[in-house]
Amino acid sequence: MIFLELNKITVSPIKESSKSIYWHPPGDKSISQRATFLASLAEGTSRISDILWSEDTVNNLIALKKLGVGIEIDNNDVLVTGVGKFGYRASNNTVYLGNSATSSRIMISLLSAQKGRFKVDGNKMLRNRPMEWVVEPLKDMGAQIEWLNNYGCLPVGITGSRLDGMHHRIKVSSAQAVSALLYAALLADKKTRIYKKTKARDHTERIFKYFDLDLIDTGDYLELTPPEKILPHDIFVPGDISSAAFLIGLVAMQKSSGLELTVKKVNLNPTRTGFLEILQRMGADLTIINQGELCGEPIGEVIIRSGSELSGVKVSGDVFVQSMIDEIPILAAVAATAKGETVITDAFELANKDTNRIITTIELLNNFGIEAYPIEGGLVVTPGEFTSPGNLEVPNDHRISMVAMIIASFCNKKTEIYNWDTVRVSFPGFLEAFNLIGLASTDDDSSSLGPSIYMEMVE
Ligand SMILES: O=C(O)C1=C[C@@H](OP(=O)(O)O)[C@@H](O)[C@H](O)C1
Ligand SMILES: C=C(OP(=O)(O)O)C(=O)O
């Protein structure tokens, strides 16, 4: 049972549940952001259906609206009327992107080629995240960007200019670095060639092809020929596997059998499914059915059943780790319930998230009595019984906050969790989904965080 009070939530021990649940997760955050940006550059109106309504995506919509892009809500959908490739309107207002590194990195690229001056900024967490991997290559394309406070960090000032095409080798294992430069390449004068460091989520490549853009992938590099203009396309956003992972993990952690969750219409892009594969390797009863495609993205249904005995695993390899980069905190919680230790390496990018998630995941587990410690580029989790710390303030990190609530529900006494509501960044409906599983319940106030308030903010 969960009881809410201001920014504190009280999580009581769960009663084991045995139900069959069908659930459609909220829209994928990465695809919602990419779809919104691409539609904003098109000439005409694109309908984005099943978009994610959360703080990150809404900040993106509000920022684009202030730049002159047409943003209208039609039921749950967004109608984006693009202004063409170079039609963003300059204003004295800061382009504010809250907590979202993905949105700010792509936005910096797009503003670099618009007419006028812009300032891009975000919240305290975002101001600590590295921006130089995007800004330095953009400068090589001719962008005029200045660091307004500290080198490498937001806020930045941008004076729009002409962008040249270029050949660039990406130095970090980040999909955002590739994506930001691909968006800049759309606005460049000539072809741009990008050599990736690793294969990470490829939603940008897929949505560019869905929009009929001239992007080739030789396996060695990506090459984009800038289009004369971009035509609007309607898009359906599949469910977010990273949000679904919290509930999938929770079911896998329940020791008694009888609980079954079917996650419907969820994105199964192979660059995102590492968590599902690792759960299968650990011995979870997880199957994938009804696979298909939606707007160039693989989708399907995931069925997870409780009651399996799980074993610890070794997780390594740049590509594999990237395919579950946002799921590592929940994997660490699942690993604590398995037999044998779990060793995660090659997860260097985790240090660059809202918090350093290697450290915050370890601290969270330690707070609940689990032995976990850092190793180079990762962590080791030793299985054990979760014990409640009584009360706990979680860091400003939505993914850590959701894992804290899940772990707390497996403790033998109540836990008060402070600062839990960063869930709004990616999954405002988390508590309702948690209730649906039947392991917890909330009072009415939980709906105050629900997706509908985000629609009101845009209107
Ligand atoms: O491209 C994206 O939409 C994202 C890529 C990942 O970051 P990196 O590619 O920087 O590792 C991921 O952690 C983030 O939640 C969203
Ligand atoms: C790190 C995340 O997103 P971003 O990098 O866009 O802030 C996330 O959603 O966990």
Image (tube, rainbow, N blue to C red):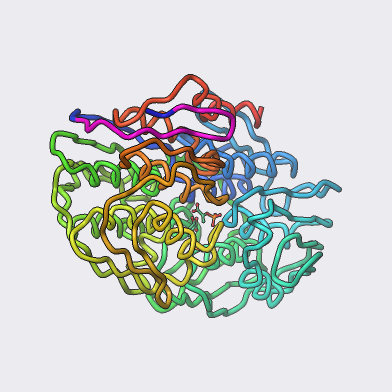
Q: Is 253 positioned to the left or the right of 236 in the image?
A: left
Residue 26 position within the rendered picture, expressed as x and y whole percent measured from the top left? 42, 37
The residue positioned farthest toward the top in the image shown: 444
At x 26%, y 44%, the residue is 300
Please state the extent of the stretch shown in magenta in the rendering. Answer: 3-17
Asked if residue 379 is among those painted magenta in the image, a careful observer would answer no
Q: Nearer the viewer, residue 434 or 54?
A: 434
Residue 111 position within the rendered picture, expressed as x and y whole percent measured from the top left? 72, 57
Looking at the image, residue 270 lies above or below residue 168: above
Q: Nearer the viewer, residue 361 or 193?
A: 361
| Quarter the C terminus occupies | top right
At x 46%, y 27%, the residue is 3
Q: Nearer the viewer, residue 386 or 42?
A: 386
Determine the image quadrant of residue 320.
Answer: bottom left
Looking at the image, residue 235 lies above or below residue 273: above
Determine the image quadrant of residue 259.
Answer: top left
At x 55%, y 33%, the residue is 78
Q: Is 393 positioned to the left or the right of 10 in the image?
A: right
Looking at the image, residue 429 lies above or below residue 158: above
Asked if residue 9 is among those painted magenta in the image, a careful observer would answer yes
Q: Is 305 positioned to the left or the right of 454 in the image?
A: left
